[in-house]
Image: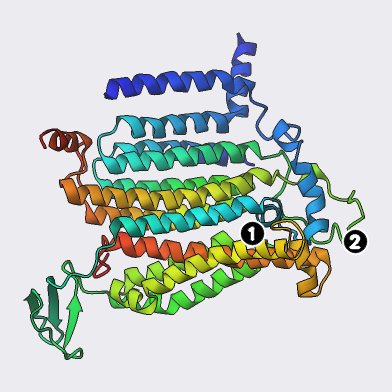
Amino acid sequence: MKILGRVTVILCGLLLLVYVGEFPDFADPQSPASTHVSPYYIQNALEDTAVPNLVTAILADYRGYDTMFEATVIFTAGLACFFLMRLPKKEERVVFYRHRATGVTLRIDDCGAVPKDTQAFHRIDSQWVPRDLIIRSTTRLLIPFVQIYALYVLAHGHHSPGGGFQAGVVLGASIILLAISQDLRSAISKIKEKTLGILSSLGVLIYAGTGFLCLLLGESFLDYGALASLLGTDRVMARSHGILIVEVGVAMAVMSVLIWIYYNLSSAGKQDEGL
Amino acid sequence: MIWQLDLIILVLVIVCAIAAINVKDLLSAAILLSAYSFMLCLLWAVMGAVDVAFTEATVGAGVSTVFCVAAVFHTTRRTKD
Amino acid sequence: MRGYNMDLLNLIAAKANYWTYIILMMVGFYALIAKNNLVKKIVGMTIFQTAVLLFYVSMSTKKGGTIPILHHGETTSLDPGHVSALVNVADYVNPLPHVLMLTAIVVGVATLGVALSLAIKVYKTYGTLEEDEINLQLRNG
């Protein structure tokens, strides 16, 4: 199998290499990729949408239909991971408790009585190591600033590199950092799974809903100029505000799906103990 | 685009990719994948694609590595090939 | 002979990114079809996807171009009828492949999440991640 694999790969590679000579030169300003549609975008994006960041303008306005289905695909991936892995809570399970003062570990089988005194006992995972004080304190200080940075990236997507996707991923990464440094159970108690499900579908709904709102106001689907009468500005600024609204929707969807997939992966469906 | 920097990053990318599929320890493969993603992010920053570099840095070198390590944690770490 | 050598060197140096993209794509393709371990196959899938991203972004560069964010002082007229003659197209790199690749990266991480959950499920059912051992267990019932 490996020899067949190597032969196939070498044949495909040679076939592709032969045609590299036909490609246009690297970094050529007159290559066909740069001279058909994109000069229109470069020259007219600022006048049509008042957004200097060309990538955000094309992503959320000129090619907004594409981005809507991409948000749907991300939501579907979160759902698929949930349906594949999530196990219901079982009553018969083994839990471990540890006495803080002496370090004695208790193993409690099959719904025996658990200690109720949380000052003296705390629950640990089956593969527990003592959590380091430096990591815990540093991440507790750092996570709010990471989230504020993510909101900055979302709001300044018009003028600097950034936008909806990047902000959503950074927000998701901050909660994953909380789950890694403290405990999966403390992260789940702060952001529950039901919240994540509602937020992700709400994000996709905001995007599609903006499109339908433009349809209801008489223009075509996802033509943000129709929002000018609702927002009280002219058509160009309405397109700029429409881009911001859909970016908020995309950020919500991406953040909640990434956290949801992490919860399911790191606890293999049980959402009880994790990495 | 300084061509020396370009050349070094391209060679490192190929080395990381070939190493990531040939090591016998799956945790090392996950970490090598993270290094590969980071080198690609540098390559795109050099080429002027700043949005793509930002997304690749957060997604590839951040979230994707955590997913891989979580999966290796729940399966096995050793592999025969 | 010397002219031929310089020609070949120019050919390689002018299209270095395309050679890298082909090598990376073949590395990922090999890992997808010839490796036994499921997680190695998933790593190969990731390498394949990022090689395609490299191809598209290399197509969008321009010599002497800067990042695709318009400078603030340049086009200051915002009335819609005015044809902007102030923006020079050759000054900015092509932003269209960047947009397509942003979508591709995020869809790639979603696919990675689903693929890894499938791998965890396979491990729980069969106790191993090697493809030949799984085939043996399936054949023996």
- Residue furthest top as drawn: C1
Callout 2 environment at 10 Å: few (<14), some (14 to 19), or many (20+)?
few
Q: Secondary structure at mark 1?
A: loop
Q: Residue at x 74, y 46 (%)?
A: C92
The answer to whether dots 2 and 1 both sit on one chain is no
Residue A241 appearing in the image = yes
Horizontal arrangement in the rendering, residue A144 relative to residue A102 (left or right)? right
* Amino acid type for the residue under numbered disc 1: Pro
Colour theme: rainbow
Q: Secondary structure at mark 2?
A: loop
Q: Which residue is mark 2?
A: C79
From the top left corner, tell me how far across and down residue A152 is, in percent: 60, 71
Quadrant including the C terminus of chain A: bottom left
* Amino acid type for the residue under numbered disc 2: Asp
Q: Residue at x 56, y 36 (%)?
A: C55
Q: Which residue is mark 1?
A: A161
Q: Residue at x 73, y 44 (%)?
A: C65
Up-down relation of residue A120 to residue C18 (above or below): below
Chain identity of mark 1 = A
> Based on the displayed image, in which of its 4 quarters is residue A274 positioned?
bottom left
